[in-house]
Image (spheres, grey):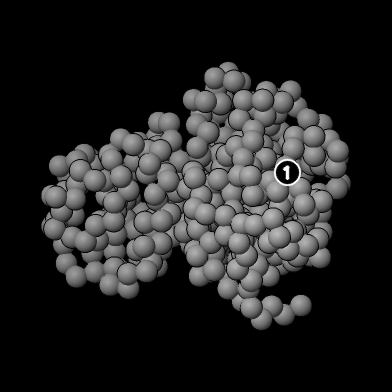
Amino acid sequence: MIIVKTLLLKNTEEDIKTAAELLKNGGVVGIPTETVYGLAADALNPEAVKKIFKAKGRPGDNPLIVHICDFSDIERLNLVTKIPDTAKKLADAFWPGPLTMIMKKSDVIPNEVSAGLDTVAIRFPSHKTAQAIIRESGTVLAAPSANISGSPSPTTARHVMNDMDGKIDAVLDGGASEVGLESTVITLAGDVPRVLRPGGITVEMLESVLGKVEVDDAVLHKLADNVKVASPGMKYKHYAPRARVILLNCNDEQYIDYVNKKAAEGVAALCCDEDIPLLKTPVFSLGKRNDYTRQAHTLFDELRRIDEDDSVKVVYSRLPKTNGVGMAVYNRLIRAAGFEVIDLEQN
């Protein structure tokens, strides 16, 4: 099917039914969630799932997350071979919400969703419209972020239309995303629960429920090209605007001094509110210096603002701390920069 025009749907009962009908018929719809907007298709329909990869230009070895609207969907649809006790504990604590759990998949999950792995990633979003669309569709939905692969994730319907108009069947406008970053991903398929992607549910929060939780090396470091990924966002350069993003490992004074010395046409700063009066470059602010929850909410919006400013060629940002939600901001920024970091503390 050739899509001539992408429908922009409203957050009404009638339009939710329209979106669900498109999904039932193998279509692809941009839907709101509390994290970012997702590019949804019937997760149990391999041909529909393939359309997600085509629309995004997404590598086929990058697995997708299956979205459910009730914990019972996992057992009812036989999505996994066994539900671990750890999954029940985490669901009680954090579902519905921005947490994705990886478990051993059943044969019900197409290889297109799992990228050939023997596991599946599952999430129960808290966004009421997302839940309504899943429920109305009568299935579960594979839904990666609704952006062109590698670019900043979308937090509004306008962002999705900018990337996907003419490539998918519809976008349903459910307002701006509350969290602003993709969900935390934790695998429960090994001996020790391991975080593969940080998000709004922090390592500290997970540890309060499970005790020992590992953090995968790929969360903070570049993964080798020949390694098969177990979660979205682990290997490839992600979240990047067209401008070159360079991270600085430095203190406050070093950041201001370095950026001001680089001040020139095409140079900008992705900074904190406190830096703005001291900088001689155009600025894109993430919020207060130590408010990582706000920075997480703002990051993708600011990266898209940078994209919309054709005059910006290079952006300097500070390397965040890795405690709490700061780990999620660090994880996204270092991928947006293609792991390009200048260590001023060593100079």
User: Where does residue 16 sit, x and y in percent of width and height?
Assistant: 69, 57
Q: Count every numbered label the image shows and give the total.
A: 1
Residue 89, picture quadrant: top right
| Location of residue 157 with respect to 108 vertically, above or below | below
Residue at image location 64% in from the left, 49% down from the top: 129
Residue at image location 74% in from the left, 23% down from the top: 85
Closer-to-camera residue (144/260) = 144
User: Where does residue 192 sit, x and y in percent of width and height?
Assistant: 64, 26
Residue 209, picture quadrant: top right
Report helix, strand or loop for mark 1: loop
- Residue 7 located left or right of residue 302: right
User: Where does residue 306 sit, x and y in percent of width and height?
Assistant: 34, 63
Residue at image location 69% in from the left, 78% down from the top: 3
10 Å neighbourhood of mark 1: few (<14), some, or many (≥20)? many
Closer-to-camera residue (239/124) = 124
User: Where does residue 345 sit, x and y in percent of width and height?
Assistant: 22, 40
Closer-to-camera residue (310/70) = 70
Quarter of the picture holding the N terminus = bottom right
Q: Which residue is denoted by mark 1 in the rendering?
A: 68
Q: Is residue 215 visible?
A: yes
Q: Is residue 224 visible?
A: no
Closer-to-camera residue (4/189) = 4
Quarter of the picture holding the C terminus = top left
Residue at image location 66% in from the left, 81% down from the top: 4
Amino acid type at mark 1 = Ile
Residue 55, picture quadrant: bottom right
| Location of residue 42 with respect to 102 vertically, above or below | below
